């Protein structure tokens, strides 16, 4: 961002993404599901059947692992002449996030945490990796009021994005969504330095109505890049996560953007376990479930790991 005009126009951005390896075909299933014990909840939850997550991100690619689970979408950016029906992903970020939540179980590729759930793709990040709060607000409002072809409604909003300043209208929309019973999940941000005594804040993740997710490594340590602050709720897998990408490929990416959809996918399964619950209480019950089952990490400060590493059993 080189000018004050651009700074005003864009409020958040996707962190630069380094892709180490590209896979055309996967020869074996990844262990991502085992990391949070997702499969142990599949039978009683029908793998998330009937749950819809709104993914507020860079759009989605027409990936074979995803296309059957995309229930709709809307483009809020200026890409493709602002055509609302064209929510094509140009950078792969939204496609990767979507795959973590709901890649189909088709015996050819990755499998999402809730592979029978559906995704509403709301594009708020443009082809250059930038977005603004007004489009994010519009997307949250759209998600709140969306009704699917069979009367479906949004249960979860995933926001693997963030900016370093607060916005009152955005916060108000988030409060409204939570009051309607929508579970809101956001990435903590990747501005961390590995020091729990330094504070890095990203919005909307820092808002208390949102489940703010940090990244934990496969060596069972907080990721150095993961933001630390007093409102971190949980940590999830966030390093070298394999998921769907552009051109029907698969790539490994790292970031709190990858950790957040693990929680969104988990929420889709948890919601299926709730019976006869008033809809506006759903976020509280989902949070309580995550809190009860999280793997506690007493060796690390709460500023880094919050209530622990998410587990479903």
Image: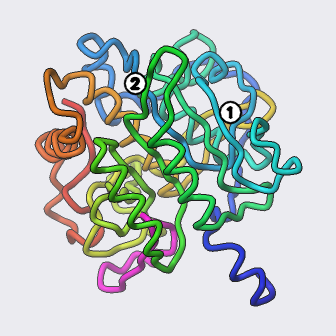
| x and y, in percent, of residue 1 in the image | 76, 81
Quick check: is 191 in the magenta stretch? yes
Q: Quadrant of residue 121?
A: top right
Magenta stretch, overall SS: loop
- Where residue 37 appears, x then y in whole percent? 29, 29
Front in this rendered view, residue 178 or 185: 178
Q: Residue furthest bottom?
A: 4
Q: How is the image coloured?
A: rainbow
Q: In the rendered image, which residue does mark 2 sit on? A: 51
**Disc 2 or disc 1, which is closer to the eye?**
2
**Tag 1, which secondary structure?**
strand
In the rendered image, which residue does mark 1 sit on?
A: 250
Q: Residue at x 48, y 14 (%)?
A: 150
Q: How many C-alpha atoms fall within 10 Å of the one at disc 2: few (<14), some, or many (≥20)?
A: many
Between 211 and 135, the one lying in front of the other is 135
Q: Any mark on residue 142, and which?
A: none
Residue at 63% across / 23% down in the picture? 66
Frontmost residue, 294 versus 284: 284
Tell which residue pokes out farthest to the right in this image: 81
Residue 255, horizontal then vertical, whole percent: 52, 57
Mark toward the start of the polypeptide (2 vs 1): 2
Numbered range of the magenta stretch: 189-204
Describe residue 270's horizontal placement relative to residue 162 as left or right: left
Q: Quadrant of residue 35?
A: top left
For marks 2 and 1, give the CA distance: 25 Å
Identify the residue at horizontal 31%, vertical 50% (top origin): 178
Quadrant, the C terminus = top left
Local packing at callout 1 (Cα closer than 10 Å; few below 14, some 14-19, many 20+) is many
């Amino acid at each position: 961002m080189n000018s004050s005009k651009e700074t005003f126009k864009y409020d958040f951005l996707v962190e630069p993404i380094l892709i180490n390896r590209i896979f055309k075909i996967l020869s074996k299933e990844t262990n991502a599901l085992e990391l949070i014990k997702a499969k142990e909840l599949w039978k009683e939850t029908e793998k998330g059947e009937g749950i819809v997550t709104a993914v507020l991100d860079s759009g989605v690619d027409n990936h074979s692992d995803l296309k059957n689970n995309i229930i709709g979408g809307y483009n809020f950016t200026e890409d493709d002449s602002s055509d609302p029906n064209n929510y094509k992903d140009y950078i792969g970020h939204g496609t990767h996030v979507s795959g973590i939540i709901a890649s189909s179980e088709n015996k050819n590729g990755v499998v999402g945490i809730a592979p029978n759930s559906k995704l509403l793709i709301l594009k708020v990040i443009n082809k250059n990796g930038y977005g603004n709060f007004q489009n994010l607000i519009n997307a949250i409002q759209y998600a709140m009021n969306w009704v699917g072809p069979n009367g479906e409604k949004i249960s979860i909003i995933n926001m693997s994005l963030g900016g370093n300043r607060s916005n009152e209208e955005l916060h108000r929309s988030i409060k409204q969504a939570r009051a309607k019973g929508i579970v809101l999940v956001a990435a903590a941000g990747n501005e961390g330095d590995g020091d729990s005594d330094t504070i890095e804040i990203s919005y909307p993740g820092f808002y208390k109505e949102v489940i703010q997710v940090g990244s934990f490594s496969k060596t069972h340590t907080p990721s150095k890049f993961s933001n630390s602050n007093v409102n971190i709720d949980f940590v999830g897998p966030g390093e070298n996560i394999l998921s769907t990408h552009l051109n029907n490929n698969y790539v490994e990416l790292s970031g709190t953007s990858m950790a957040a959809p693990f929680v969104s996918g988990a929420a889709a399964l948890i919601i299926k376990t709730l019976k006869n619950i008033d809809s506006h209480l759903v976020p509280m019950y989902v949070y309580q479930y995550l809190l009860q089952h999280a793997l506690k990490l007493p060796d690390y400060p709460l500023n880094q790991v919050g209530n622990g590493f998410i587990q479903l059993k």
